[in-house]
Amino acid sequence: MQKVKQKNDKATLLSQLKADIKAKNICADLAENATNLVMGVGNPNAEVMFIGEAPGKNEDLQGEPFVGAAGKFLDEMLALVGMERKDVYISNIVKYRPPNNRDPLPDEKKAFWPYLLQEINIIRPKIIATLGRHSMEYFLPEMKISTVHGQPKRIRLGNDRVVILPLFHPAAALYNGAMRETLISDFETVPEIIELINNENK
């Protein structure tokens, strides 16, 4: 019974976060040209939270992160490790689509960063898997994704310690066979990392 209540509480907090972003008109220029504010989706009690960069065209239209080709690849990788979308939580740093799918600007990422931290604090995942360098650099500044991908790093985030798993962005791996294999290989360590964390907490 307690779990259901907690889930509902988290859903309320996430709805409030969405309302706050709209009320404060965060990144007004992006909002003006976007169809939807794209918030995170999935299990609010997830052990794993995936964080990408910003919504693309499909995400903007559907109002949900990772629903295009990169999202289908993410679903494939989840299936490989015996998971589904309903088991994890998926979000982006920037919640509105940048025009023409350009990279999010530093100011845009900075504007959304406090809201992403609130989102993480609501979900309280054991692992944050960053998808691409834009989301990685906020958690692991000074590090290069080409050298640290697939290597879990424990950091302090607010009052909590959390494991960051830097991964290449699924979009980058769609048309690059070698990167695709690397991403799958890195992804397959997720259940192992969860098990190690759970054993530590026993």
Image: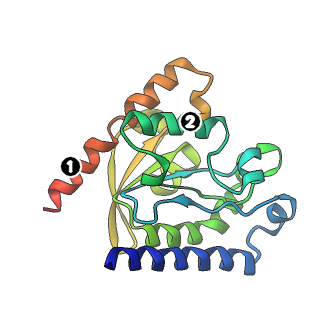
Q: Quadrant of the N terminus?
A: bottom left
In depth, the one of 99 and 79 nearer the eye is 79
Residue 2 point in image, percent of width and height: 32, 79
Q: Which mark is residue 170?
A: 2
Q: What element carries label 2?
A: helix
Residue 44 appearing in the image: yes
Q: Residue lying furthest right in this view?
A: 33
Mark 2: amino acid: Pro
Q: What element carries label 1?
A: helix
Left or right, residue 135 beside residue 36 = left
Residue 49 appearing in the image: no
How far apart are the two marked residues, 2 and 1, measured between alpha carbons? 25 Å
Residue at left 62%, top 34%?
Answer: 171
Indicate the quadrant where residue 21 lies: bottom right
Q: Mark 1 points at which residue?
A: 196
**Dot 2, crowdedness within 10 Å: few (<14), some or many (≥20)?**
many
In depth, the one of 137 and 169 nearer the eye is 169
Considering only vertical position in the picture, is 137 above or below 148? below
Residue 53 point in image, percent of width and height: 62, 50
Left or right, residue 116 beside residue 6 = right
Residue at left 52%, top 56%?
Answer: 138
Mark 1: amino acid: Leu
Q: In which quarter of the image is the C terminus?
A: bottom left
Colouring: rainbow
Residue 83 point in image, percent of width and height: 40, 44
